[in-house]
Structures are given as C-alpha cells and as structure tokens.
Image (cartoon, rainbow, N blue to C red):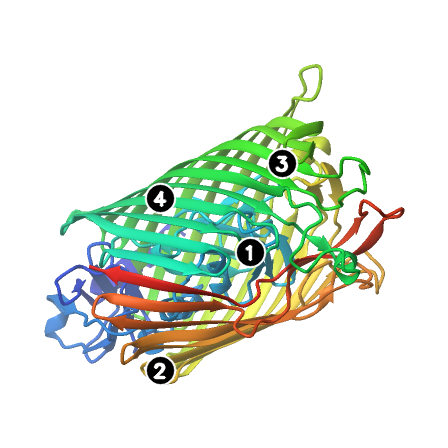
Amino acid sequence: MIKNTLGILLLLLSGALNAHTISGTITNQDSTPLSGVGVYNKNTGNYTYSNNSGAFSLANVSVNDHVYFYSLGFKNKELLITENQLDTTLEIVLEEAAVSLDQVVLVSNINAMSSFVNVDVKSDPVKSSQEILRKVPGLIIGQHAGGGKAEQIFLRGFDIDHGTDIAINVDGLPVNMVSHAHGQGYADMHFIIPETIDNIDFGKGPYYAEKGNFNTAGYVDLTTKKTLDKNVISMEAGKYNTLRGLGMLKLLESDDDNAYIASEYLISDGVFESPQNFNRINIMGRYNHKDDAGNELNLTASHFQSKWDASGQIPQRAVDNGSIGRFGAIDDTEGGNTSRTNLLVNHDKQLDQHSRFKSKFFISKYDFELYSNFTFFLEDPVNGDQIKQKENRTLIGGETSYDKTIHLDQNNSQFRFNTGIGFRYDDINEVELSHTLNRKTTLDRLAYGNIDELNAYGFFNINYKINKWNINPGVRLDYLKFDYENLLSTTYDQKSENKLVVSPKLNTIYQASQDLQLYAKTGIGFHSNDTRVVTANNGKSILPLAFGADVGTIYKPKDRLVLNLALWHLFLEQEFVYVGDAGIVEPSGRTKRFGVDLGARYQLTDWLYAYGDVNYTYARSSEDPSGEDYIPLAPDLTSSGGITFKGLKNFSGGMNYRFIKDRPAKEDNSIIAEGYFVTDFNLNYTWKNWSFGLIVENLFDTEWNETQFATTSRLFNEAEAVEEIHFTPGTPFFARGKVSVSF
C-alpha cells in the first residue's frame, strides 16, 4: 500500500516537473503593472490571472497553443506559443480600449457571470447608492423611509427585507448588521460613494464556502478603486431642491505608493409634500502600496453620516377618500439619523507563482436611530403608535486565507485549494425599541438591552480541474455565540446561547467548449436569527438552514453575445423571526422556492451595448394548505435591462428599465401588491476634460408604488381598524443636471 502511494506521488511529481509553463509580466502602455488580467489557453481551457505585481504563470502550455490576455478596458491580445517562449520571461503590453463584451473570455470559473455583468457596470456606471444593487441580475430594491434607511431587497422569490438572506461586503468589510435594532441582516449601503466602485462580484444560492452568514439567496461583493486615473470634481442639481457634490482627488502617486480621497455631500427635500430635509456626507481615504516582493497593502478609512425626515407608508384608503395626496403623510414626524466610521486593512502576499496569503482586519463604529409609525392610532388612539429603534455598535473582525495551486501532470490537470479562518464580533449597546410621541417624548420602553454576538469560522475549498471538468467541493464551519442582557429587568438578566454549524458545498463545471459552459451547484447555507430570538427561545432554531441547487449554462455563440440560463431550487427550514417593529417573535415555517433565471448581453457595435434579465420564481410555504401558502411580497416575475452607448462622437448615455409583476401581500392572496414598469435615462456630453450630463429617473412619469405592505392600521377618526395596502409612492419624473471636470 505504501509503495503504491509513493509511486503515485512520484508520478504526479514527475508530471509537475515536466509540465511546460509560460510566465512573465503584464503592463499597460505606460508600463504600469496590471493585476487581475486573465490569461487563457484556448487549446486546453487552462486559465490564470496576473497578480498584484502584474506577474503571471500559466502551466501545461505546449507549442502552437493559442493564449489570450484579456481585461475589461483593454484590447484582447492573442499569443501563438513558440518553443522559445517556454523558456523566457514574457513582457505583455495591453492597449487600452473602450469596454466591450468581447474583452471577457468564458472560463470555468464558479461565478463566470460576474465578469459579464461587470460590462454592464462599466458601460453604465452606477449613479447613486440606491442603484448599486440593481446591477445584480434579478435583484430589485425599494426605499420606504425617505432615502436614509437601507433599501428593501427582493431576490429569487424572497422579500429579503433589508438583508436577511443576502450577504453583502465592500472590499471585504461586512455590510449586514446582525441583531440590528430594525431588522436582522440590516444592510445600509449609503456609506459607499458610487463613483468609487470598480466592479461587482455576485453569486446566487448557498454554494460558496468562503461566504457564511446570510448567504442563502446569494451574496454581493463590491470592490472599490485602489487608485484614481484622474482627479474628478462634479456637481449635480435637480428637482426637489436636490444638490450633490463630489470630489475625488489624488494625494500620492508613484510606482509603489498611491493614495486618494473621495467625498460626497447630498441634500434634498424629496418628492413628498412634507420636506424630507435629507442630508448625507461621505468621506473615504484609500492608500495602496505594492512592491516587488509580492506585497500589496490597502488601507481604507471612511466616515458616513445621514439625517432625514420621512412621510412613511400611507394607507390606500386615505388617498382614495382625498384626506391626503399620494405624496402626503399621516405622520410626517418619522425619520432618523445614522452614521458609520470604518477602518479596513487588506494585505495580499504573493509567496510564489502558485501560492498567496490574503488577510484583512476591520473595525467599524456604527450608530442608528429611526422613528416610524406603521399603524398610526391602532395601539394608542390618543398619542399614536410612533416607535423609536436605536442602537450603537462596534464591529470588529478579521480573516486570513491561503491559496495554493498544484499542477499535477501534462494532461490539463490541476489542483487548487483555498482555506481560511476568521471572526466577527459585534458589541451592540443600548438596543432600544420604544413608544414615542413626535420624536421628542418616550412614552414607554418596549425592549432595551445589550447584545454581544461572536461568529468564528473556518472554510476549505478545493478546485480540481481535469480536461474539461472543474470540480469544486468545499466545507465551512461556523461557531456562533449569542449574549443578551435585558436592561429593563430590575435584576441582572443575562442569557447566552451558542451553536456550531457545518455547511458543505459541491459545484461542478463542464467547459464543453470555449463558447459553452454547463454547471451544477449545490450546498447548504444559513442565516442567523436575532440574538433576542435565540435567547428568548432557549437556543431553538438558532441557525435555520437553507438547502439549494442550481443547474445552468452560459453560452457565448459570438464574441459579442452572451446568453445564460439557470434552473434552481431553495428550501428553508423552520425559523423564528424577531419583528423589530413590534418587539415580538413570530415563527415563519418552512418555505420552498424554485425558479428560472434567463439573461442576455449583446455588444451590437463598438459603441452600442444591450442587456436584459428575466427571472421567474414559484415561492410557497411548505406547511400551509393550498391557497393560503403564498409568501407575502415574494415576487414571482421580475425583469431588468437596458441599452447604453459610449464613444459616439462626444456623447454617451443609456436607458434602462426594471419590472416587477403584481404579487400577493397576504398568505391567502386576498390583498395584492401592484407591480410596476419604470424607465430611467441618462445622457452625457464630453468636451475636453469637461462632462455635462442629464440624469432622469422615471422618464415616462409612471405612477407606481415603490414599496407596499398589507398592514392593519387605524386612523385618528376611525372606529375600527382596517387591513389593506400601505405604500410608499415611487419617485415621479425626476431630472437633475450634472457637471464634472477631470484633471
């Protein structure tokens, strides 16, 4: 047995030693090293990426192989391998070009679609923080608290609320807030300056070992720019007393060290009859260091704060009887304020051509205070039902991972593993739910306490690539500890629970050809429940699991056309949900969802690009009888897409749409949330280093409801409560102009 094992190891080692490899560096025309450039062998399907120094190494290469070098914003370069190139260091220079779909090569990456969607991002850059998540195919968002509150998210038949079933990170910094005062997984992305976004990586389903809590419907990772190409100053002005200023300035620029600062200030009265008095400020500083030893260090510091008034969700009956208009309010003293200060350190160490260490450490200081009134005078007919939700939090965490690639033989076989450990600790103090009057007087404290929550984890990923197959098993181990101190108790009241969960994953890709990829994904994920739920229920259903499976294909019949199709299924276990607006625990039961995702992207010409996605979901409760098993607000049909143009003389711009079909607002489908079709438009003209733009939201002035809920409420003059749709009206035609200068 030992002899056989040694024989196999020697055979593998000899294969690795005999394998031909090409290596070198990749730069732009200014001799600046380019990281993340794809290097793809058309003959074998092998691929790799340049590291932070622009260096690359591609194994299993033979004479007469066709190797492509590709990156968004650069012309593809093809190299026909000769005998001499196997033994020399290559110097590859890429020429800059307008972003185009043919600059993306289909490789057997677990999330190949992210590369194609980034063409959407580069062709039509994000213009507001609300628009960031809309770039993910099938993801719909809605705002219902004046622009200062995190958006409501819909994806794959989930009303995710503010982030319960989607994991969101920015440069490795978690956005989701566990055990939040308003809702579990609360993900406020308004601290991100849109113009700093470089690319988006996303994945749907619980199939990724490096992703943990909240990764059930999917995840979204945003990466911001490490350096600036140019300094930028811009100003926007528009309807509703809206004014926005932006500045992005280089502080340091050299071969090894770069730094910049970006800032944003936004004020607006909003579309409502009662002025929103919204203001937000963002400041971000970034330092980037690279050296010849393979080190890359990124230091990021940022601060965000926001304050606003809101008109809330209004009852349909009040609009129908004329007591208020569509943009009126029952209680216009709603609103809030929030802030977040972040410090993030990312370090990437390239040990050699085939291995690297990555580490990150972050600390955030976060404050939140929100006033809402959903039921008006249902509970308190004299003072009204306004509530306050408040917390202050310190978030600390870190992660270290190791990545190693081993080339086993000359038959296009390679073994790659990625493993890591990390932790996240949330110290949340004075988490409060109170009954208030006019944001001034606290009438009654309904919940008040301190939360400590720890998540320690480890993960292990394997990618085994042989011929046209890429097999990716993985496993994740999470330990969570929940502590809650009830400050309303007259005696010391501290409760604690903990849980360990194992999440296996298995993904398989078959690269049928350079133009066709087939894949199957399966895995188990979870989202944690609120600490107040966990301790109140003695640890019952701490980590409800999600069981998912995807099968699909990506097809690129032409260099400038990409089609994708996925069939998927997702099952969620029994869970208990903490309703932060009421301070109560509600069981939600088991749920099942299955659906179809369909998408297309087409580079019609060098300057014209079109994209579109259609997503269908069947979502039902597994425990309720037929006809009473609808999942409230779960969308069954959504679509989004657009057409953009760039480089048409001095003009650029585009038009995009989003659609959501009517959907049930109650379990028995007796109340319907109306769907909508909304179109946005933008146009830009560039003259020398100046840019003049027009941004229009809701181009056709469609009357639509951005968010809707089936709510039981009572108005001041009503004797009985009424259950019906309560909604936040969508923005009407909204135009603003923009002037930018770069230098």
Of the pair 176 and 271, the residue shown nearer to us? 271
**Real-space CA distance between mark 1 and mark 3, rounded to the nearest whole angstrom:** 31 Å
Secondary structure, mark 2, is loop
Of the pair 352 and 492, the residue shown nearer to us? 492
Q: Which residue is mark 2?
A: 559
**Real-space CA distance between mark 3 and mark 2, rounded to the nearest whole angstrom:** 52 Å
**Real-space CA distance between mark 4 and mark 1, rounded to the nearest whole angstrom:** 34 Å
Answer left or right for 221 relative to 271: left
Mark positioned earlier in the residue sequence (1 or 3): 1
Residue at (42% x, 40% y) in the render? 421
**Real-space CA distance between mark 4 and mark 2, rounded to the nearest whole angstrom:** 40 Å
Q: Is residue 342 above or below residue 517?
A: above
Mark positioned earlier in the residue sequence (3 or 4): 4
Q: Which residue is mark 3?
A: 389
Q: Amino acid at mark 3?
A: Gln
Q: Amino acid at mark 4?
A: Ile
**Real-space CA distance between mark 1 and mark 2, rounded to the nearest whole angstrom:** 31 Å
Q: Pointers 3 and 4 in contact (CB under 8 A)?
A: no
Specify whether residue 36 is in view. yes
User: In front of the other: label 1 or label 2?
Assistant: 2
Q: Position of residue 178 (x, y in %)?
A: 56, 40
Q: Which residue is mark 1?
A: 206
Q: Position of residue 54 (x, y in %)?
A: 20, 59
Mark positioned earlier in the residue sequence (1 or 2): 1
